[in-house]
Amino acid sequence: MDAAGIAFQILQSVFVVLAAPALLGWVNQCRAWLQNRKGPGILRPYFLLWRLFHKEAVVAHNASALFRATPYVLFGCMWLAAGIVPVLATDLPFAFAADIIALVGIFALARVFISLAAMDIGTAFGGIGARREMLIGFLAEPAMLMTLFTAAFLSGSTALTTIVETLAHREFAIHPGLACAAVAFLMVLLAENARIPVDNPTTHLELTMIHEALILEYSARHLALVEWAAAIKLFAYMTIGIALFVPWGIAEGSDWLGLPLAVAAAAAKLALAGAGLAVLETVSAKFRVFRAPEFLSTAFLLAVLGMLVHFLTDV
Amino acid sequence: MNLASFPSAEAAVGIGLAWLALGAFSLLESERARFVARGVFPLSALVSFALAALALRTLGDPADTLTLPLGLPDLPFHVRLDGLSAFFLCLLGVCSFGITLYASDYFRSESVQKLRLLSLQYHWFLASMTFVLLADDAYMFMVAWEAMALSSYFLVVTEHRQGTIRRAAFIYLLIAHIGALSILLCFGVLHEAGVEAYSFDALRQAQLTPFWASVAFLLALVGFGAKAGMMPLHVWLPDAHPAAPSPVSALMSGVMLKTAIYGLVRVVFDLIGSPMWQWGLLVAGMGATTALFGILYALQQNDLKRLLAYSSVENIGIILVGLGLAMIFFGSGHPEAGALGLIGAFYHCLNHGAYKSLLFLGAGTVLRSTGMRNLNEMGGLIHRMPQVAGYFLVGSLAISALPPLNGFVSEWLMLQTALQAGQLDNGVLRSLVPLLAAMLALAAALTARCFVKAFGIAFLGQPRGVVSEHAHGHGEEDASLFERLGMAWLAVWCLVLGVFPSTVVGLLNQVSLSVAGAGLPPSALEAGVLWLVPSTQARASYGPIVFLLVIAVVVLITYVTVRVCFHGRLRRAPPWDCGFPEQTARMQDSSEGFGQSIRVIFAPIFRIAQRVPNPEDAQPKFELRVEDKHWHGFYLPIARAVEYLSARIGKLQQGRISTYLLYSFVTLIALLVFVR
């Protein structure tokens, strides 16, 4: 663990936390363009966060300490996740502390906390939100793990940095196992980040919402942290996808010269992925909640299939 | 003191005898209930602590044997303390220390008569578990095993005035005896003809053909599986564990189930010696099914203790998956991966002992303080009993396999074992082992859902019902001092086992070396206290200390930054009522509601009887009953077949002396014809 590595680590973590709202803004902007609207601009999420931080927090009378602590835990979890996923460089000394299984564990930790916080007040919405979130979670989490395992089998390691290094040196060829995993991963990404077709991030229609139902009782700084954490989560998921399926261009080792190139490559890939997400959200409609398990069990089975295909083709 | 000459086996036997003495003593000390609760139980906790310390110290030592001058004339009791015994004794000591401390407060308000008996059974239960783990011959093992079954049976029927509890205890006793019979037969198969002694040494030396070894293995699997709660032999567990007083439930779930795991490991890895991979596949398959079914049933429970009991079934399934993986890898010649699986299974035993005991104790305090065990009556308990809520939350997070607590470590180790599947030569195995990983991941995610339900419905939200009048106990709302101490001890273990896994794995590696003769590669053990590494750090590593440190620092930075840069103003207000002010606490999500989507997705595995009222009903009532299919699909047909057969055979019995004479005459003729 050298100084350069730690510098890279801190730089990347801060970069991700600061850049995450911009990605969300970019997705919203693209969607607005596609829907023939002018759009609020990429920087809109930052203004929103700024405004929320300045407001006075309103908390229900019977809220417990758990309710108030959760936004911080959530934000901490997401920050941690952002620190593990190689976005700019693969020389991340902290990445040894948590491999892909631990990464899924961090997301699960965040999910359990937000669900518990939603149940804390005891309103009907909170309970329903928690129930739906855990429904998404119990299917998405193993699907995500299986997707990552496919990559782990390919590279013989569960450390994300090693996986990315191995995959980046691979020749460009569509591996059938990895292709299945990529589709499964995309489905998990949509479900985990409350995007269409599983959830609609722009609605407050009570019968369908998941994410919004969970955070209905939050306001001001608590809401800001929760929303920011959600933005980092989307960012982390996209970078995981990029790291697994299109890792080329990442800076290897403590390569300061490669850094500008890596930033440019990451920005370009993320912009493309964000635009893709906006297209996907525009052309598809939201499912009924009852269809979500079907959607996610498809993802789970696809991911398992991808893992098995790897064994069949790799003999 | 010279380590080599330390009489560790004698000391362990002494600890067992001390428990026997404590039990007998509390029966004699008939007048002073307070003395039993306040004197005997804390003393017994000290004995537990001594046991844990002794076992931890002898973990890496060579086996220490002892022959006791007890038992039948030609069949003395053999005692042996080796790595495997020491590990499980350590588990027993650690868990029972917390549970016994808790029990000294929990049982305080019981009547003298009841407390005397309870204390006797409780301590004899502890002693019999100790002797099960120490036994080195089939005879002593079976005696201790039966003593364990009987003492726990009497503990289960503590509230014997309720019919359901008597029935639960009866089924427990029945299945315990079917299991014991199977274990006895297993020892019989292992026993080589001609050799007189039933000592484990003689059994170890017996040369078995693969066929007879497999028969012995299957008998052991049925016998120990019945005790551990493996599907479909689990039906006694969700009835018996909740029926017992909470500290006893904790002891049964946290420790007694592990003695069955101990037995299975002892027979397969030690007595038979060389597991075959086919056995591993069977064990892992049974384990994965048990884990999935267990957690799915747990999700449908409304009774908190029953939910915990079903979750114990799930955890036993996970342990069996770990053991099965170990057997697969050992059986196909990959001892390093096998050792990893074995260590994962042992680790999970320890973890489950810590967090399930903790959760049962938490449920116990809720029951004592409010008289409630139905989740649909609870709610908002975090305000009434913040201490219990805190400990229950730690237990819930740990059991949900969330980092950085302990449940995650064993989950991680088992997934890492499954990821070694690439080494296997057999193509079928290579694709089946990752499937086990998928089942494990699914079970873990479902566990998280289950415990969000348990904690969220019981402790969060608003109170759903009125606190019942007949709440017993000693008047304290939250956990009392000793209850807190007991739970704190177990909660600390949940954290310690989660944060210092490499130290624990180092110790478990010695256990694996002593029982299976193989351990982890040296590169795994040299990584230092910070990193948990299964083979090399480039392959995989997990550093919970760094993890915990970073998450704490990040949360702190966020908190301070938000406070410094902005403000900390907070206003309390009523929650948003969605424009509908007539809301009551009963409009919160219920326990059935939380299980609804699972019920729909996995409908075929449940036996559901549901009655939904229609709009015209004058008195609309929603009814739902979800039952275990095994009971109707497996046990009742067997019971009917037995009844049918006995009815047929009963026809022979007519009560007329002339008919019986005829039977004797026919039998005599038959004997004369066939036997010369």
Image (spheres, coloured by chain):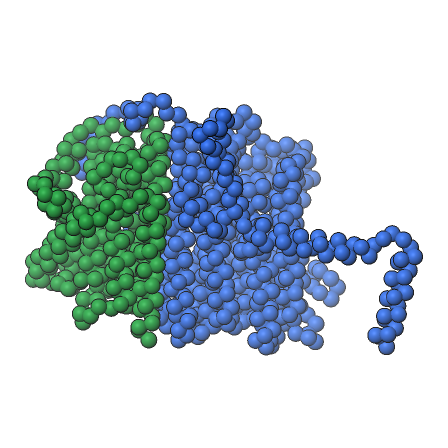
Chain colours: A green, B blue
Q: How many marks?
A: 0
Residue A37 percent across, percent down from the top left = 9, 41
- Left or right of A67 on screen, residue B674: right
Classify the position of the C terminus of chain A by image quarter: bottom left
Residue A150, compared with residue B638, is above or below; it is below
Residue A272 percent across, percent down from the top left = 13, 55
Classify the position of the N terminus of chain A by image quarter: bottom left
* Residue A151 appearing in the image: no
Which of the two residues, B320 or B2, is positioned nearer the viewer here?
B320
Which of the two residues, B37 or A94, is positioned nearer the viewer here?
A94
- Left or right of A50 on screen, residue B213: right
* Residue B434 appearing in the image: yes
**In the image, what residue occupies the spot 43% across and 64% down?**
B341
**In the image, what residue occupies the spot 69% across and 63% down?**
B76
Residue A36, compared with residue B2, is above or below; it is above
Residue B147 percent across, percent down from the top left = 65, 52
The residue most toward the top is B581
Residue B534 percent across, percent down from the top left = 35, 64
**In the image, what residue occupies the spot 41% across and 49% down?**
B601
- Left or right of B304 on screen, residue B539: left
**In the image, what residue occupies the spot 39% across and 42% down?**
B452
Q: Quadrant of residue B568?
A: top left
- Left or right of A211 on screen, residue B313: right
